[in-house]
Image (cartoon, rainbow, N blue to C red):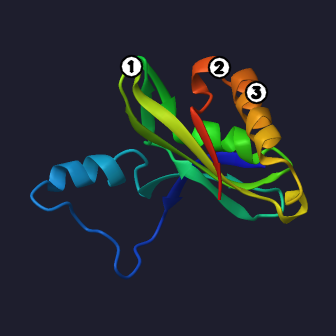
Amino acid sequence: DVSGALCISQAWPGMARTIYNDHKRFLETYLTPYRGFFFTGDGVYRTSEGYYQLTGRLDDIISISGHRLGTAEVEDIVTHHAAVAESAVIGYPHEIKGEGKMLSFLPQYISWGYDTDTLAAELQELITKKITKYAAPDYVQVT
């Protein structure tokens, strides 16, 4: 049971080798953070059985009223709810806060009878409790 950055030790066919007109940026972004490895930019969780689960982009940041918040952080909290199979958090332009958050999630098949309004409220409360009030999404969508 460990979480961290997903890095790859060997080249593979079709992998990126540069960024057009900015090779230095390519090196700094993908090859410098973890010497000897290609940094994918994704977070990963490895179970004690050796299975991998991508947890989201490590560089996806939403700025809400001056507070920087990683989308993976919120998605990780949401997917720990028994009724949620997968989730995604995206930012959208907000007149007052600069950016707002929208949470979209896929329910577990066992929760199909779950009231979506109740579940949305539970998820917002869970995010508020585990992270902070401003991290709770403005909109929750069942996918």
| Residue 124 at x, y percent in the picture | 71, 31
Q: Quadrant of the C terminus?
A: bottom right
Q: Name the residue type under label 2.
A: Thr
Q: Which mark is residue 125?
A: 3
Q: Distance of mark 1 from mark 3, alpha carbons?
A: 22 Å
Residue 119 visible in rendering: yes
The residue at the point 21 percent across, 49 percent down is: 25
Residue 43 visible in rendering: no
Q: Earlier in the sequence, mark 1 or mark 3?
A: 1
Name the residue tied to disc 2: 132
Name the residue tied to disc 1: 96
The residue at the point 87 percent across, 57 percent down is: 111
Farthest residue in the left direction?
A: 21
**SS at mark 2?**
loop
Q: Distance of mark 2 from mark 1, alpha carbons?
A: 19 Å
**SS at mark 3?**
helix
Q: Name the residue type under label 1.
A: Ile
**SS at mark 1?**
loop
Q: Nearer the viewer, mark 2 or mark 3?
A: 3
- Check disc 1: other Cα within 10 Å, few if <14, some if 14-19, many if 20+: few
Q: Name the residue type under label 3.
A: Glu
Q: Is residue 4 left or right of residue 40?
A: right
- Check disc 2: other Cα within 10 Å, few if <14, some if 14-19, many if 20+: few
Q: Nearer the viewer, mark 2 or mark 1?
A: 1
Of 59 and 108, which appears nearest the observer?
Answer: 108
